[in-house]
Image (spheres, rainbow, N blue to C red):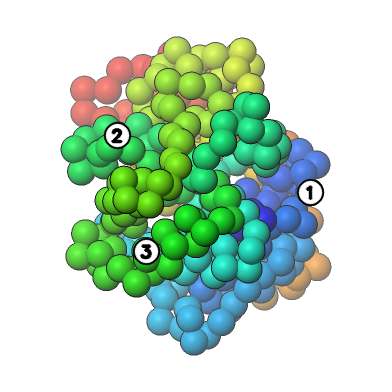
Amino acid sequence: VIVMVCNHGQSELLLNWACAMKARGFDTTTVLLFATDVETRDLAKSLGLAVYYDTDLFGEMPKNAAKAYADGAFTKMMMAKLYCVQLTLMTGVNVLFQDVDVVTFKDPLPYFHDESISGDFDAYFQDDGNHALYYSPYSANTGFYYIKYNDRTQYFFNSFLLAGDIIFSTHSHQISLIALLNEHASMYALRVKILTRDGDDFPGGYHYHNRKAYMKDFFAKKVDPYIFHMSWTLNKDNKIKYFQQMGEWFIPDDKACVGKTVEQIGGAQQVESTCCSRQPVVTCHYKDKPSKTACPNAEFIDKKGRSWW
């Protein structure tokens, strides 16, 4: 099962992911979306996704998008990320969790199902790219990971749920999870694999901002990744702009669709026809960030920025 969680403030990223999946002909029947508000529930249903929504579980979750990493809204939504994986895993299925700031190029599930390729592990995490001490020893990114159902992973996520207050004290789902990974690998033989940042199959924000040669190959179609995860990004607005520059934005009319409810779009029957493009919409924003085409007339986002092209 592919598990995702979203609130209304991030719903345009969910919409873009779903539109890209439809444009590329992917099956979404294995996806379970945990909606933390009614607006996101209705949007997901209009896109044909299976949705779980519970007012007792998610009633106090914020509807707005986080303004920055680790702010109050961000921290509360990190608890939702924990709930949805723990609940799904307890039903006895393997779980691929991914954030909504992901676009898919190839179905990643066969990779994890084939141990001759992925290896025999209990948990597989995208490499965050940030190898600072507070993410050691794994630097696991919690926006894209695969968990096999077994006694070790059940115990891990049950323990994480009981220690959930660590997320509020650190303001980070990632720091908390990595600390617990280290404990369970050492004490309970949990087998963890990190999908290295030096590889080409599971790129993210680290690649976007730090591996220029990789991004050149990406635009030239010399690499064949499974997904791209727009991590390492200050906020949702920048995620959208970077996706638009990459040619991975599939919403043709932002004014009609971004931040809108199903009713504001015109009803459930109008969502896909109004908000999903079969071809990506490419827009330049910053000349110093990777882009599918050169952006000579765009502005710089970084101090002392230089043209990426």
Q: Residue at 57% x, 31% y: name it.
A: 119
Which disc, if any, is residue 160? 3
**Relative depth, front residue between 173 and 59:** 173
Distance CA(mark 1)–CA(mark 3): 31 Å
Q: Which tag, 1 or 3, sits closer to the chain's start?
A: 1
Q: Mark 2 packing: few (<14 Cα in 10 Å), some, or many (20+)?
A: some
**Mark 3 residue type:** Phe
Residue depicted at 40% across the width and 81% down the height: 60
**Is 286 located above or below residue 19 in the figure?**
above
Q: Quadrant of residue 134?
A: top left
Whichever of labels 2 and 1 marks the residue nearer the N terminus, that label is 1
Instruction: Say whether residue 130 is visible.
Output: yes
Task: Tell me the element at label 2.
Answer: loop
Does 61 sit above or below residue 75? below
Amino acid at the residue labelled 1: Asp
Residue of label 1: 27
Counting from the top left corner in percent of width and height, residue 195 is at 47, 32
Amino acid residing under circle 2: Asn
Residue drawn at x 37%, y 64% is 160
**Horizontal side, residue 166 vs residue 56: left or right:** left
Q: In this view, does 29 lie above or below 83?
A: above
State the SS at label 3.
helix
- Quarter that holds the C terminus: top left
Residue furthest out toward the bottom: 56
Q: Mark 2 points at which residue?
A: 130
The one of 152 and 15 positioned closer to us in this rendering:
152
x and y percent of residue 218 in the render? 56, 20
